[in-house]
Image: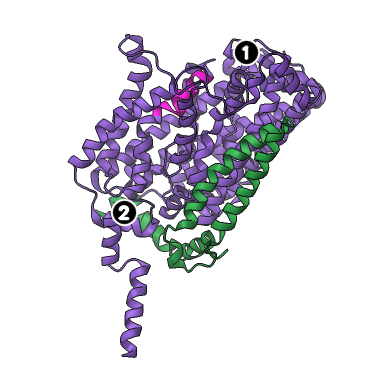
C-alpha cells in the first residue's frame, strides 16, 4: 500500500484541478460549432495533434502490457509494441489520402469511397461499431486504472475506473475536442517527464545501466538483451513467423485505413490538422514519440526484472513499471508520479469519450436521425453521448476485470485480422467495392470469435498462437470477400472518379484515372490541352 | 543530388513518385533503428549507438526528400478545400437532397 505525504497530495490535487480547468478555459471554443466540438475547427498546427497522438496512445494499460512483454522476453518484447509502426508508412500514404477526403470520421469516409446502399450500410456499421468499441476501450483503459489503484491504495477495483473516468468526462463534455487536445499537450509533457524520471530512478536503484546488463547476464538471461534472436520458423519461444508478423502487418498496414484500431483515433487528429503536411507530420512525430517512450520504459522494466526476478503471474509482473515508480521514487515525487499516471489515464479516456461521442453524433444522429440538426443540437447531443460512452465503459471495464493483457491481442490483432487486407484494398484498388468490404467485416466478426474462443473450446481447432490465428483469420475471411468482389458490380464510376480526383489514392486505379482524364479532370490533361492550344496558336 | 526532385509544381506533386517511395521505405527502417538503437544505447551497448545514429541519419534523409513535395501538395490542396467541404456537407445532410 502506497502512503502519500502532504507534497504528494498537493501534486495530485493540483493536477486534477489543472485538467478540469482546461474544460472551463476552452468551453467557449468547444461550443462554437460541431466542427469545433469534434475537430477543433480543422485548423491545428502539426505539433498539437502529434502530442495528442502520443498522449492518447499512452494509456494506463500500456505500461502494463509493455511491462509484460519486456519482463518475459527482454528487449525482444519491444517488437510486441511496434504495432504503432503503421504510422510510419501511413504518414506518407493513407494519412495524405484521408486528409484530402476531409471525412470527419472513418464512417464518413465510407460514403465517400463507396456509393449507394453498401456505402450507407458501411457507414452505419462502422459508426455503430465504433460507439461500442470506444466504450470497450475506455472500459479497458479504465479498469487498468482500477487495477493500479487497487494495488497502490487497496481501493475496490471499480473506484479507480469510475472516479477518474468521471473527471475525464467532465472536461471532454464541457469543451469537446478543444479541451481534449489542449489537455493532451500538458498531459503528454507530464507523462514523458514521468517516464524519464522513473527510468532514471530505476537505473539508480540497480546502480547503473552497465550494472543492469551485468546482472541480467549473471542471472543467465543474456539473451534478454538481444532483440533479434529467433528459435526457428514457427517453433520455440521466438519464432521467426511471429517476428515477420510483427514487422509486416503494422508497417504494410500503413497503406490502408483502419488496419489498426488506433487509426480511428488518429483519423480525428488527421482531420483536425490545418494542412495535409501538418496531418502527415503529426502522425509521424506522434508515433516517433511513442517508440522513444517504449525504449525509455524498457530500461525501467529490465531494472525491475533484476530487482524482482522469478515472477510468473501476469498480474504481478505487468505492474513492473508502476511498482518501480511507487516503490523506488522518494516521497514527494511519488505524488508527481501518480499525477503522471493520471495524465496517462486522462489523455486516453477523454480522447476516447470524445471519439465515441463523435461517431454517435455525426454518423448516427446527424446523418440518419436528424440531418437538419442545428449546430447547437449537434453539440448538445455530442455532450449527452460523451456521458453515454462513459457509462458503457463501466460495463466493459467490470467485464474485463484483471485480465488486461489477455484482452490486448484479441482486441488489437484478432478482431481486425480478417479486415486487415480489405482495409488496405479499399485504398489501393478501385475494384474493391462496398459489398466486398461489408462482407469482410461481417465474416471477420463471426470467424474471429470462432477461431479464438469457440472452436478451440470444443476441440475442433487446436489452440493456436496469436500470430497463427492472425494469418488463419486473414485467409478465412478472404474466402468470403474475394468472391463477393467479383460477383458484384464495381462501384459507380461517378463516385470513383470523384474520390480519385479529390484524394489521389495510391495503387491500382487505372480505369478510374483514365476516366478522370477523359473527363478532363486531371491536371495532366489540362497541361496537354494547354500545350495543344499554345501550339495551335503558333500555327 | 539531382536524382531527388526538390522543386515541384502542384500537378507534379499530386502524382505518386519515387520520392514518395523513398519515404515509404525509409520510414519503417527509421522506426526500427531508433527503437532498438535507443533501447540498447540506454544500456550503453555499443551496437545500440550505431543503430541510433543510423536511425537518425535515415530520418533526416527521409524528411529532406519528402518535405518539399508535401509543402506543395498542402499549398495546392488548401485552395480546393473549401469547395470539397461544401460537397461533404451535402453528403452529411443527405436527406435534404431528396
Q: Which label is found at residue B38?
A: none
**A482 vs A378: above or below:** above
Q: Is residue A149 left or right of residue A425?
A: right
Chain seen in purple: A
Q: Main secondary structure of the magenta part?
A: helix
Rendered location of residue A215, percent (x, y): 74, 18
Residue A314 location, quadrant: top right
Kindly check if marks 2 and 1 are in contact, taking CB atoms under 8 A apart as contact.
no
The quarter of the rendered structure image containing the N terminus of chain B is: bottom right
Q: How is the image coloured?
A: by chain
Q: Distance between the residues labelled 2 and 1?
A: 52 Å
Tag 1 subunit: A
In this picture, which residue range is highlighted in magenta?
A405-415
Chain seen in green: B
Tag 2 subunit: A
Mark 2 or 1, nearer chain start: 1
Of the pair A408 and A157, the residue shown nearer to us: A408
Of the pair B53 and B66, the residue shown nearer to us: B53
Rendered location of residue A363, percent (x, y): 38, 42
Rendered location of residue A110, percent (x, y): 34, 45
Q: Which residue is drawn at 34% across and 74% down?
A: A528
Residue A20: say if magenta. no
Q: Mark 2: which secondary structure?
A: loop
Q: Can residue A33 be seen by looking at this rendering?
A: no
Q: Which residue is drawn at 39% across and 13% down?
A: A463
Q: Name the residue under label 1.
A: A316
Q: Is residue A508 left or right of residue A157?
A: left
Toward the front, the furthest residue is A232
Q: Name the residue under label 2.
A: A509
| Same subunit: marks 2 and 1 | yes
Amino acid at each position: 500500500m502506497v502512503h502519500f505525504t502532504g507534497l504528494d497530495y498537493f501534486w495530485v490535487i493540483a493536477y486534477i484541478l489543472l485538467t478540469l480547468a482546461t474544460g472551463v478555459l476552452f468551453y467557449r471554443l468547444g461550443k462554437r460549432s460541431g466542427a469545433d466540438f469534434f475537430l477543433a475547427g480543422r485548423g491545428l498546427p502539426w505539433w498539437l495533434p502529434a502530442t495528442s497522438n502520443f498522449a492518447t496512445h499512452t494509456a494506463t494499460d500500456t505500461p502494463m502490457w509493455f511491462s509484460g512483454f519486456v519482463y518475459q522476453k527482454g528487449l525482444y518484447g519491444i517488437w510486441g509494441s511496434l504495432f504503432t509502426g503503421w504510422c510510419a508508412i501511413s504518414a506518407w500514404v493513407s494519412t495524405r489520402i484521408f486528409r484530402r477526403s476531409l471525412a470527419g470520421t472513418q464512417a464518413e469516409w465510407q460514403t465517400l469511397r463507396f456509393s449507394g446502399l453498401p456505402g450507407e450500410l458501411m457507414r452505419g456499421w462502422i459508426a455503430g461499431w465504433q460507439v461500442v468499441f470506444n466504450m470497450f476501450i475506455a472500459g479497458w483503459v479504465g479498469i487498468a486504472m482500477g487495477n493500479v489503484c487497487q494495488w497502490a491504495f487497496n481501493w475496490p477495483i471499480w473506484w479507480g475506473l469510475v472516479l477518474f473516468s468521471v473527471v475525464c468526462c467532465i472536461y471532454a463534455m464541457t469543451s469537446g475536442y478543444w479541451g481534449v487536445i489542449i489537455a493532451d499537450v500538458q498531459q503528454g509533457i507530464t507523462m514523458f517527464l514521468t517516464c524519464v524520471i522513473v527510468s532514471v530512478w530505476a537505473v539508480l536503484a540497480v546502480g547503473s545501466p552497465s550494472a543492469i546488463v551485468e546482472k541480467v547476464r549473471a542471472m543467465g538471461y543474456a539473451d534478454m538483451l538481444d532483440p533479434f534472436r529467433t528459435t526457428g520458423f514457427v517453433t520455440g519461444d521466438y519464432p521467426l513467423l511471429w517476428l515477420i508478423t510483427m514487422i509486416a502487418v503494422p508497417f504494410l498496414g500503413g497503406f490502408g485505413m483502419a488496419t489498426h484500431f488506433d487509426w480511428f483515433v488518429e483519423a480525428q487528429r488527421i482531420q483536425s490538422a490545418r494542412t495535409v503536411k501538418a496531418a502527415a507530420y503529426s502522425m509521424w512525430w506522434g508515433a516517433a514519440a511513442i517508440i522513444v517512450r517504449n525504449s525509455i520504459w524498457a530500461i525501467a522494466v529490465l531494472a525491475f526484472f533484476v530487482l524482482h526476478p522469478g515472477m510468473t503471474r501476469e498480474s504481478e509482473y505487468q505492474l513492473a513499471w508502476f511498482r518501480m515508480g511507487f516503490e523506488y521514487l522518494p516521497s514527494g515525487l511519488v505524488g508527481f508520479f501518480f499525477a503522471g499516471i493520471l495524465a496517462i489515464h486522462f489523455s486516453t479516456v477523454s480522447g476516447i469519450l470524445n471519439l465515441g461521442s463523435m461517431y454517435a453524433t455525426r454518423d448516427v444522429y446527424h446523418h440518419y436521425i436528424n440531418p437538419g440538426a442545428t449546430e447547437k443540437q449537434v453539440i448538445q447531443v455530442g455532450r449527452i453521448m460523451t456521458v453515454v460512452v462513459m457509462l458503457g465503459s463501466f460495463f466493459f471495464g467490470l467485464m474485463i476485470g484483471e485480465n488486461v493483457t489477455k484482452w490486448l491481442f484479441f482486441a488489437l490483432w484478432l478482431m481486425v485480422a480478417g479486415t486487415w487486407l480489405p482495409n488496405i484494398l479499399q485504398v489501393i484498388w478501385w475494384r474493391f467495392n462496398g459489398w466486398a468490404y461489408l462482407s469482410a467485416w461481417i465474416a471477420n466478426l463471426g470467424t474471429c470469435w470462432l477461431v479464438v474462443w469457440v472452436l478451440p473450446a470444443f476441440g475442433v481447432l487446436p489452440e493456436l498462437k496469436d500470430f497463427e490465428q492472425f494469418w488463419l483469420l486473414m485467409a478465412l475471411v478472404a474466402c468470403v470477400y474475394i468472391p463477393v468482389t467479383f460477383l458484384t458490380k464495381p462501384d459507380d464510376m461517378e463516385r470513383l472518379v470523384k474520390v480519385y480526383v479529390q484524394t489521389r489514392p495510391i495503387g491500382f486505379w487505372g480505369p478510374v484515372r483514365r476516366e478522370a482524364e477523359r473527363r478532363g479532370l486531371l491536371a495532366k490533361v489540362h497541361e496537354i490541352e494547354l500545350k495543344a492550344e499554345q501550339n495551335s496558336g503558333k500555327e | 543530388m539531382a536524382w531527388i526532385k526538390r522543386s515541384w509544381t502542384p500537378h507534379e506533386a499530386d502524382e505518386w513518385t519515387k520520392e514518395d517511395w523513398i519515404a515509404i521505405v525509409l520510414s519503417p527502417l527509421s522506426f526500427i533503428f531508433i527503437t532498438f538503437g535507443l533501447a540498447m544505447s540506454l544500456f550503453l551497448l555499443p551496437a545500440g549507438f550505431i543503430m541510433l545514429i543510423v536511425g537518425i541519419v535515415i530520418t533526416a534523409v527521409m524528411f529532406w526528400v519528402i518535405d518539399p513535395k508535401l509543402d506543395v501538395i498542402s499549398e495546392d490542396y488548401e485552395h480546393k478545400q473549401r469547395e470539397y467541404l461544401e460537397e461533404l456537407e451535402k453528403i452529411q445532410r443527405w436527406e435534404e437532397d431528396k
